[in-house]
Image: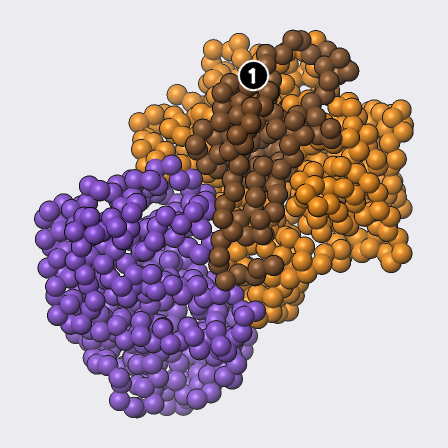
Amino acid sequence: MMARLVRAAQDPIGPLAPTRITLTVDGEPVEGVLGQTLAGVMLSADTVAWRSTSFRDKPRGAFCGIGVCFDCLVVVNGQRDVRACQRRAAPGDVVEFHRDMPLSTPEERP
Amino acid sequence: MTEVLVIGSGPAGLAAACAARALGRRVVLLDASDYVGGQYWRHLPPERPARREAVLHHGWSRFQAMSQALERDPLCEIVTSAHVWAIDAGRVHVMVGEADGAGREARTYAAAAVVFATGAFDRALPIPGWDLPGVFTAGGAQALAKGERVAVGQRVVVAGSGPFLLPVASSLVQAGSTVVGVYEASHLAHLARQWTARPWQLLATPAKLLELAHYASVHVKNRIPYATGRAVTAIHGGQRVESVTISAIDETWRPIPGGDVVVAADAVCLGHGFTPRVELPIAAGCRLDARRFVQVDEHQRTSVAAFYAAGEITGIGGVDLSLSEGTIAGHMAAGGHLEDRALRDARARRDALRSFAERLERAHRIGENWTDWLSDETIVCRCEEVSVGRLRSVAETSRSSGLRSLKLQSRAGLGACQGRMCGRSVETILAAAAPGGHLIDESTTDRRPIATPIRLAELAFGNDKSVEK
Amino acid sequence: MDVTIVDRGPAAGGTSAAGEGNLLVSDKGPGAELELAKYSLDLWRSLVGSLEDELGSAFAPVEYDPKGGVVAASSASDAEALFRFAEAQRGVGVDARTLSVAEALALEPELSPAIAAAVFYPHDAQVQPAVASEALLASARAAGTRVLTGTAITGALRDSGGRLIGVTTTNGSISADDVVVAAGPWSGDVARLLGGVLHVGPRKGLLLVTTRMAHRVLHKVYDTSYVGAVQSDSSALQTSSVIESTAAGTVLIGSSRQDVGFDDRIDVAVLRAIAANAIRLMPFLADAMVMRAYGGFRPFSRDHLPIIGPDLDVPGLWYATGHEGAGIGLAPATAELLTALLLGEPTSIAVEAFLPGRASLVGTA
């Protein structure tokens, strides 16, 4: 595990018992903690990429973490263009990954 | 009626709201997050209580005192999840509801005075591989550590420039990560020159020194290697970060041949200074200064009557300066006078801290030859995946010296983030490739009349009935 | 001819960078402008290929897309008017195909099924206007044209008899036998510096841009009020729908027309009206995320026709301006007409309606 949630027992802040929630991420059930953002839930599961870029089909996930870079966009309950680092996870949320077809503009292509 | 509208609830915004309330004005405090505190006091939401959250923060008691006083105050309305998306004719247009939601509540405020306290975000310079998953901005990694208790990696490299890298490394350590090293691009000799040029000025800001001393002690205790004159110049990996190249760089940030080391890491945190969030002040018509921060006078007034600004949007200076500026801005926006007793401390602190901030900025400013670590393939605009080579090619083939045209030719800065991440780097690279080495239009990448995205239906059907006069 | 282009800013920095890049016949009724448009669209078709051949693949793509336009009517009476308009256009050789609702939805599936009827114009097309301008400029440069950007006109050079023999600029004087003002909505100001009187004003327009999405808008899609607005004399705010996808996957949503001088601020009430019109026409857009709004100024003349040709009172002064929202589309034909006039050669189509001295431009000052 690389990206992960700080383990409660080792956390200097002494977290109290969290409320567990379950959501569906890319078709799989994923457990999270009430109060996490969607990015927090996914990073806690060491999922660091959840979007493919439109032109070069590269993996992307969180980058700025504060809602500025728009790299972490996901589809939530059918709605596109939601910043995963800004949206709180709600029990039962269905999160899908933006996998745009690479667009065929005449721009530079690898 | 709203007498003072404060946009942003970080240190500057909270201080502004408190100062305006102290003069008896009705205050509305807006923040896009679902709780107050801003990036500096980013903390866990109420759903995740903890016994000792204060250990993650500086000035936590000050934060709690301000936020609790405002929360208890019936004449201060705190509106969280408030997304300010436009300002026209002095009116502030807001959607209230979840981030990037739909059908949010539309509100429009026409306040007697407005205080902008919208803060800043980390600037990350483009680096080959910086678009790999596992690369974060330094502030992003810290926000995830403090606001989510997420450690972004096991072995983390922190790189960039400025004293802010130190608290980021501390936050990472507190989240259980191993910080492989903190790589400060500025040279020690350069830092020393800037810091000791007028040593008496440091005496005016003891709190700053204490804060830095604290971070330094955390670093010593945790044996975090700290190196100056070093930069991450390439990030490697297939689907995510696996290693980074750390280069020795000269004082202009040009990599020195033979000075590369490759280090294994699973996350990288980059912070090459900050970019102020100026789209709302620009939309309101406020002038920027030569450094492209919001221009304010000693009253914290912008160039537009009744609009004030405080905190990092007026210059990067840290929390104490933000608090002082916020206090002055809130007091003045509420109709106070600069000579009022209530401002005496804040003014003295502001003036001392500003010179401290200017020295920090000089010490850590971006070296002009950072572009030497780019290759033609390096992505600059992350959203539209525009490479360095593409930027140079449109400039060379069209021989244009217009930013607008070059953006439209390359699509740099036209994607979802609207140039927030790449804008200033795009400008630098295009200017260097343009005839004569500079761009000639007045346009910059800072202008974003739609300050945060809005669903078309929200735009269409959000009515203005809630305008307060 | 020996040509120098002078621009106070960078090239393509004003109106050319602020529009949608419309190459349209659909919004023009029978008359001189439609003839100019038909001719110009023919020129564009061949021009795009020759520009690409000349400039090579390193040059940014002009994004020429002959996608066709669909004009939708929302009520039975609008449909009747639209069909009459299309019939008149067919009478002068425009390919304008009337569509039932079912046919329209087959062609453009996201159109509101509540529309009454539509007309399809296969010859409507689109370019990226700033890139197209830069491509034309690069081609001109390759043919020997001198380009001076960042250079503003400050006045006229005259001989001892008072005849215009060039211009003074912020970067020195330039002598010329002929001076052509093609400064869009700022043309009147430049003409005045050179002794001419030209009534061209700015008509502000705002556009919305969505985030990238899969292509769901296949043609240029307008409502019938667009045609009315283009030809309108009203100075009050007008909004009408124009919706189209770009090559990068964003959707451009217009449009508005407002006579407010050169005030470039974004007006939320105008954005709301544009958004509401678009959702009425293509309901799926309700959920689309708007990430940008931008505006620009169309150069409009009193009779809404371009102004192409000599200033009769100032020998040596010429105009190519006043195309309102159609400048990109009409540019190649305008250039050809102007060149023929400068050389004293016959023009390929009638030019009388566009001459600066025409009756509809004078006498109302």
Q: Quadrant of residue B368?
A: bottom right
Q: Relative to residue B447, is residue B175 drawn left or right?
A: right
The x, y position of residue C48, in whole percent, is 42, 73
Q: Looking at the picture, does residue B6 appear above or below residue C115?
A: above
User: Which amino acid, mark 1?
Assistant: Ile
Q: Regarding mark 1 in the picture, which secondary structure is present there? A: strand
**Residue at mark 1:** A21
Q: Relative to residue B60, is residue B407 drawn left or right?
A: left
Chain C pictured colour: purple
Residue in front for this viewpoint, C331 or C154:
C331
Q: Looking at the picture, does residue B55 appear above or below residue C243?
A: above
Q: Looking at the picture, does residue C334 appear above or below residue B35?
A: below
Residue in front for this viewpoint, C352 or B342:
C352
The x, y position of residue A25, in whole percent, is 55, 29
Chain A pictured colour: brown
Image quadrant where one finds the C terminus of chain B: top left
Residue found farthest to the front: A28
> Residue at horizontal 34%, vertical 76%?
C43
Q: Looking at the picture, does residue B379 appear above or below residue B319?
A: below
Image quadrant where one finds the N terminus of chain B: top left
Res. B295 in view: no
The x, y position of residue C275, in whole percent, is 32, 41
> Residue at horizontal 70%, vertical 48%?
B129
> Residue at horizontal 31%, vertical 33%?
B461
Q: Relative to residue B48, is residue B206 drawn left or right?
A: right
Chain shown in orange: B
Residue in front for this viewpoint, C25 or A49:
A49
